[in-house]
Amino acid sequence: KWSTELQKVAQGWADTCKWSHNPDRSSDSPSFGYVGENKYLRTGNFNVNRSVDYWMLERSKYNFDTQECSSGICTHYTQVVWHNSEYIGCGVNFCTSMVGLSGWNNVYFHVCNYGPGYVFTLYLRKKRMI
């Protein structure tokens, strides 16, 4: 379901052109507790499907038997498909330069926030304790 609350926070972060996760996204979205976030950069024409396709490519790094990343990063994928993330809100901004990421100029910065978010590292820690 679309959330205007999450969309406003995502758009606000996209507008900063900072290549880092928004440290305030959960406190800025009090309805959701923990808020997950995916980011994507694109030169040329922006198409939202490319962002989602890029995050979904990480599926190949996810081991369904162990429910862990088999190699590399797969947390963008797990956030997109996590069953408890009922709400999403996204924003996009054209950035002439990215703060914290040299060499990326004139790009579209796409940010999606998910509520409630998926805390993959916490899940893995709990799983290893069992």
Image: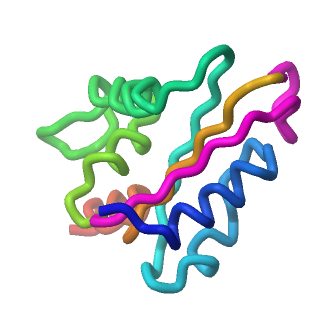
Q: In this view, does 66 lie to the left or right of 79?
A: left
Please say whether residue 129 is one of the residues in the magenta stretch.
no
Residue 98 is situated, as x and y percent measured from the top left of the image, at 83, 35
| Residue extending furthest toward the top | 44
Q: Which of 93 and 35 is in front in this view?
A: 93
Q: Nearer the viewer, residue 11 or 54?
A: 11
Q: Which of 122 and 100 is in front in this view?
A: 100
Taking the spot 27% from the left edge, 34% from the top edge, the residue there is: 62
| Residue extending furthest toward the left | 65
What's the magenta region? Answer: 86-105
Taking the spot 40% from the left edge, 28% from the top edge, the residue there is: 49
Task: Tell me the quarter of the image containing the N terminus.
Answer: bottom left
| Residue 73, image quadrant | top left
In the displayed structure, would residue 39 be above or below residue 8? above
Residue 9 is situated, as x and y percent measured from the top left of the image, at 62, 65
In the displayed structure, would residue 20 be above or below residue 42? below
Taking the spot 66% from the left edge, 54% from the top edge, the residue there is: 21
Please say whether residue 87 is one of the residues in the magenta stretch.
yes
Q: Is residue 78 left or right of residue 51?
A: left
Residue 112 is situated, as x and y percent measured from the top left of the image, at 51, 51
| Residue 59, image quadrant | top left
**Number of numbered discs overlaid on the protein picture:** 0
